[in-house]
Image (cartoon, grey):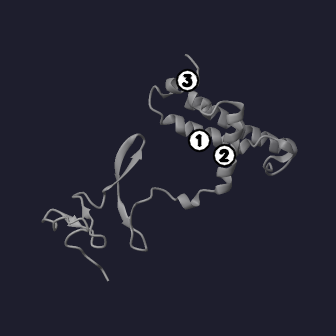
């Protein structure tokens, strides 16, 4: 059964010809509905479409398939980040440009292939014999490159100042 409301719980007046209410919740919809949700993407606010879930709830449409993210890969990423914060400072990586992160990404990938070739194996077991997790480090450096690429201009100087580094 669909329940509609002529007024909201807060006593809003009935909608005029140019106003619409959601038939399930009675919430007053803006003229640009169903795109009334707001998300921040690349430092700007954008409108996101609204969709109804199978249970009837309204939600902002999700961009991407979050359910397909591999948790083991993220755990390896977190382990590399933890290692890095003990060796360097927490935001030290934000000081480096995209190109340097990509260069280090390639270094880790080629080191992975070199290890495979030297050992004559099809894949390098994760942290075998205490060795560095080359793919985990490559993943981490690629994440750094993606993050640094979208940082606002002047951000590096702010990080340097907060880390006590003067340029």
Q: Position of residue 51 (x, y in %)?
A: 37, 65
Q: Residue furthest top?
A: 167
Q: Position of residue 48 (x, y in %)?
A: 36, 55
- Residue carrying label 1: 143
**In front of the other: 102 or 85:** 85
Residue 15 horizontal side relative to residue 75, left or right: left
- On-image quarter of the N terminus: bottom left
CB-based contact (under 8 Å), mark 2 and mark 1: yes
Disc 2, SS:
helix
CB-based contact (under 8 Å), mark 3 and mark 2: no
Measured in 3D between alpha carbons, the distance from the residue under mark 3 to the one under mark 1, in whole angstroms, is: 20 Å
Frontmost of labels 3 and 1 is 3
Residue that appears at 53% across and 58% down: 66
Measured in 3D between alpha carbons, the distance from the residue under mark 3 to the one under mark 2, in whole angstroms, is: 24 Å
Q: Position of residue 150 (x, y in %)?
A: 47, 36
- Residue carrying label 3: 160
Q: Residue furthest left?
A: 17
Disc 3, SS:
helix
Frontmost of labels 2 and 1 is 2
Disc 1, SS:
helix
């Amino acid at each position: 059964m669909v329940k509609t409301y002529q007024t909201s719980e807060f006593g809003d007046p009935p909608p005029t010809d140019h106003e619409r209410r959601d038939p399930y919740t009675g919430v007053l919809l803006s003229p640009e509905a169903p795109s009334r949700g707001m998300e921040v993407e690349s430092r700007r606010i954008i409108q996101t479409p609204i969709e109804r879930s199978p249970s009837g709830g309204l939600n902002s449409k999700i961009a991407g398939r979050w359910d397909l993210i591999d948790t083991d890969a993220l755990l390896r990423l977190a382990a590399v980040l933890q290692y890095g914060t003990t060796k360097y400072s927490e935001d030290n990586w934000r000081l480096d440009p995209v190109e340097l992160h990509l260069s280090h990404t390639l270094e880790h990938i080629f080191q992975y292939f070199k290890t495979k070739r030297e050992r004559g194996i099809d894949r390098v077991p994760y942290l075998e014999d205490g060795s560095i997790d080359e793919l985990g480090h490559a993943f981490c450096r690629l994440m750094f490159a993606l993050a640094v690429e979208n940082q606002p201009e002047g951000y590096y100087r702010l990080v340097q100042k907060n880390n006590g580094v003067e340029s």
